[in-house]
Amino acid sequence: KVVGTTPYSEQVNCGTPMVSLEKSNYSWHGKIEIDEKGAKRTVSLKENPAMVDISSVPSNTKVQLLKGDKEVFSDVTPCSTKLIPGHYEVNFSKDGFRKKVSKEKIIWPKTELEGKLERAMGYISVSVVPRDALIKIGKYNLPPSKRQKLSHPPGTYTLFADKKGYRGEKKIVTVRDRKTTVVNFELKEQMGTMKFDIVPARSKVSVNGKTIANTERPY
C-alpha cells in the first residue's frame, strides 16, 4: 500500500509494521518498531539488481562477467542472471573460436548481452621440390593453387609429399590462430643398382637414350 513519499510522518498504531521504500531502481524493505513515543529512523536505499539475459553465436559458449578482478557470474549461453547496474568486463570463449572480451554497461531494469564469436583460423604455406609432387593433408589432396596459403583451424596436422621415382616424406605441423605455418619439402630421387654381364666387352650402355658407360668388364 502506497501511503506517501519521504520525508513522511503519520500517526499509526503501535507495533512492528513492514515498511517498503522505493525510488526508481533503489529500494529498502524492513520492519520498524513503533511505540507510544513514535519511531524515527534513517535508512539507506539499496540499488535494485537488473535482469541480464545473455546469448551468443554460436550457442553453448562459456561466458564470464567480472567486476574489477572479481568474477561475479559464469555460465554457458544462453543464460540469465541478476546484477547490480554498472560496468562489467564480459568474456565469451569457446574451443575453435576467438575469445571475445568487452566492457559492457548493465542498466536497470533489464540488459541484453550478445557475443558473436569469430572462428579461429590459421594458415599453411607449402613448397615442394619437385613442384609437381603430390601433397596431402591427412587424406585431403592439396592442389597447387592452394599451396601458398591454405586456411585451416588451429591444431596439429600430418602432411605427406610423394611422387613416383622419389622417396616420400612426412611432416607433422602445428597451426596457430592468425599465424602462417611454412612447410618445405625437398624429395630425394629413389636410387637403385643396375648390373650387367655384357658380351662382348667394351659395349656401350645407354639408359633412356643417355650413354652412361663403355664397358670393359661387368657393369
Image: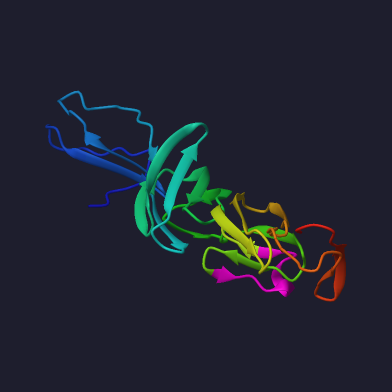
Q: Give 153 or 174, whichever is nearer the viewer.
A: 174
Query: How far from the left and from the top, in percent, is residue 14?
Result: 12, 32
Q: Is residue 92 magenta?
A: no
Which stretch is magenta?
Answer: 140-150
**Residue at point 82% right, 64% down?**
201
**Residue at point 63% right, 59% down?**
168
**Residue at point 84% right, 68% down?**
203
Residue at the far top in the pictured view: 37
Query: How far from the left and from the top, in percent, is residue 191?
Result: 70, 58
**Residue at point 35% right, 30% down?**
43
* 82 left or right, relative to 127: left
Image quarter in which the C terminus is found? bottom right
Please determine whether, in this image, residue 65 is positioned above or below residue 142.
Answer: above
Tally of marks: 0
Q: How is the image coloured?
A: rainbow
Query: How far from the left and from the top, in percent, is residue 101?
Result: 57, 48
Q: Give 29 or 213, whichever is nearer the viewer.
A: 213
Q: Give 177 or 31, whichever is nearer the viewer.
A: 177
Query: How far from the left and from the top, in percent, is residue 96?
Result: 50, 56
Q: Is residue 49 visible?
A: no
* 160 left or right, relative to 187: left
* 171 left or right, relative to 148: left
Q: Is residue 117 visible?
A: yes
* Residue 109 in which image quadrant: bottom left
